[in-house]
Image: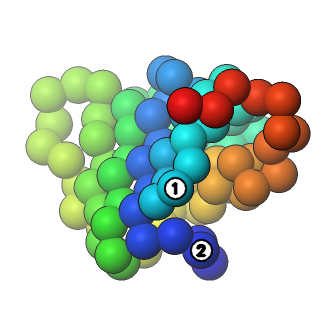
Amino acid sequence: MIETNRLAIIVDDSAVYTDDKVIIGLDFSSCNIPEDIHAIQWVDGQGEVEYRDTRHNLIVTELPDWALACYEQFKAAPEDLPLV
C-alpha cells in the first residue's frame, strides 16, 4: 500500500515523485520493471502506465507489482540520494 495520493515513477530517470518528495537515482534493478515501460502516473487511486512505443497508455486501478517495488525502494532510500 502506498502512503501518498500522487505517485509518478519515471524509469529512465530512476526517479520517484510523490505528493511532497522526489528522489532521483534510485536502483530499480530489483523491481522487475518490464522493458517496454517508460513510466507510471498515479493520482487518487488510479493511474496510467506509459509505454516506450506508440501504444496508448494503459489505465490501471491497482498499482502493478513492479511499481510497488519501486515505491519501496523510494521509501528505503538513503538520505544522501539527490532530492529535487
Decide: is 44 above or below 50.
below
Q: Is residue 6 above or below residue 1?
A: above
- Locate residue 30, reporting x and y percent: 77, 39
Q: Which residue does the numbered mark 1 point to in the structure image? A: 20
Give how far apart the Cα atoms at labels 2 and 1 are. Answer: 11 Å
Residue denoted by label 2: 3
In this view, the residue in front, 31 or 70, is: 70
Q: Residues within 10 Å of mark 1 (few under 14, many from 20)?
A: few
Q: Is residue 17 left or right of residue 58?
A: right
For the residues bearing labels 2 and 1, Cβ distance under 8 angstroms: no
Q: Let me know if residue 66 appears in the view.
A: no
Tell me the residue at 64%/32% (across/down): 83
Q: What secondary structure is marked by label 2? A: loop
Q: Is residue 4 visible?
A: yes
From the viewer's perspective, is 46 left or right of 15? left
In what element is the residue under mark 1? loop
Give x and y (percent) for residue 70: 64, 48
Q: Position of residue 40 (x, y in %)?
A: 38, 48
Quarter holding the N terminus? bottom right
Q: Residue at x 32, y 66 (%)?
A: 43
Q: Quadrant of residue 44?
A: bottom left
Q: Residue at x 64, y 55 (%)?
A: 71
User: Callout 1, which amino acid?
Assistant: Asp
The correct choice, above or below, for 11 with respect to 58 in the image is: above
